[in-house]
Image: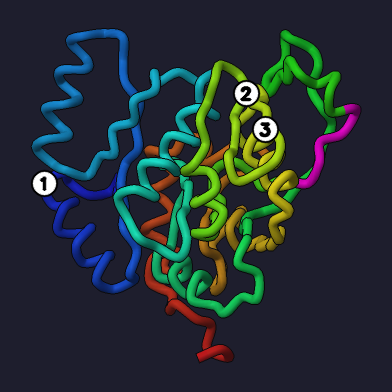
């Protein structure tokens, strides 16, 4: 979508939604700057491709924004799955739709590129986790943050959540869920508590375009595409990225 003039993006959304059955929205929080907020609200009214979330747009509040997004999306759209995808990844919506159309036996499903890794406890380092002492030396299994999918039943539980400072209370569960510093870890902790099925799919975090890649980003160097404005254009000019069929020849 970065490749299109904004005036044509609404038409693209309509075509994509008709072709894939997916709905696309830019999700953004609020700004303390009144002037920026006024400009944003004007753009929201003009293009109607934003989902404006009542959470301050700040990196440290990303877990709160993510929860607010799932609540808002659940209220606005009746869907089988809800996807969180960053805008600095190269996405093939047609292949994403095919992935979601797959029959599953688990109603509580969490789809993504699953990972583990050391807990960062140094405040000077990126991905610092202030609650690291509660986790230990290594993170539990969770999906990379740039893109993951939650089934409707999972989001229904999150939509019933009430957040009180750093703690999230889920009324459908008999215990409380905690906010961690990092969004992907926070979501992963909720998924463990909810006893969901973890579906690991490496096509969601492919470092290059392939006949089966769904989302491409410069993993592990960057949490998304490095220099996304230029990389997005470069990738879109590659036939394997933009013009290859939805399914490989052997699967059609």
CA gap, disc 3 to disc 1?
A: 42 Å
Which numbered tag is attached to residue 167? 2
Q: Residues within 10 Å of mark 3 (few under 14, many from 20)?
A: many
Residue 218 location in percent, x, y?
59, 44
- Which residue is at the front of the view, 196 or 216? 196
Of marks 3 and 1, the one in the foreground: 3
Dividing the picture into quadrants, the one containing residue 212 is: bottom right
- Where residue 133 appears, as percent x and y from the top left, is 85, 19
> Element at badge 3?
strand
Label of residue 117 in the image:
none
Q: Which residue is mark 3?
A: 177
Residue occupying the point 58% across, 91% down = 250
Residue assigned mark 1? 7
- Relative to 81, 175 lies left or right: right
Residue depicted at 14% across the width and 31% down the height: 43
Asked if the residue at tag 2 contacts the one at tag 1, i.e. Cβ–Cβ closer than 8 Å, the answer is: no
Mark 1 crowdedness (10 Å alpha carbons): few <14, some 14-19, many ≥20: few
- Residues 119 and 167: in front is 167
Q: Which residues are magenta?
A: 136-141
Of the two numbered discs 3 and 1 on the same chain, state the one appearing first in sequence. Answer: 1
Residue at 17 percent across and 46 percent down: it is: 5
Q: Is residue 127 left or right of residue 209?
A: right
- Looking at the image, residue 223 sits to the left or right of residue 220; the answer is left
Secondary structure mostly seen in magenta is loop
Measured along the vertical axis of the image, is residue 2 above or below residue 92? above
């Amino acid at each position: 979508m970065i490749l299109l003039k904004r005036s044509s993006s609404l038409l693209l959304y309509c075509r994509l939604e008709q072709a894939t059955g997916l709905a696309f929205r830019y999700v953004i929080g609020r700004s303390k700057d009144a002037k920026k907020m006024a400009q944003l609200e004007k753009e929201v009214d003009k293009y109607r491709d934003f989902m404006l979330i009542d959470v301050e747009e700040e990196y440290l509040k990303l877990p709160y924004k993510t929860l607010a997004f799932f609540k808002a999306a659940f209220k606005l759209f009746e869907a089988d799955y809800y996807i969180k995808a960053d805008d600095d990844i190269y996405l093939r919506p047609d292949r994403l739709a095919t992935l979601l159309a797959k029959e599953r036996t688990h109603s509580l499903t969490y789809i993504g590129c699953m990972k583990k890794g050391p807990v960062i406890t140094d405040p000077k380092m990126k991905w610092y986790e202030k609650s690291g002492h509660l986790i230990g030396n290594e993170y539990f299994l969770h999906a990379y943050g740039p893109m993951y999918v939650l089934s409707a039943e999972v989001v229904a539980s999150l939509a019933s959540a009430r957040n009180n400072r750093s703690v999230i209370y889920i009324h459908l569960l008999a215990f409380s869920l905690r906010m961690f510093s990092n969004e992907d870890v926070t979501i992963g902790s909720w998924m463990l508590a909810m006893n969901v099925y973890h579906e690991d799919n490496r096509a969601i975090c492919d470092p290059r375009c392939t006949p089966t890649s769904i989302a491409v980003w410069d993993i592990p160097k960057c949490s998304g595409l490095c220099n996304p404005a230029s990389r997005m254009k470069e990738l879109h000019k590659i036939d394997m990225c933009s013009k290859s069929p939805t399914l490989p020849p052997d699967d059609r």
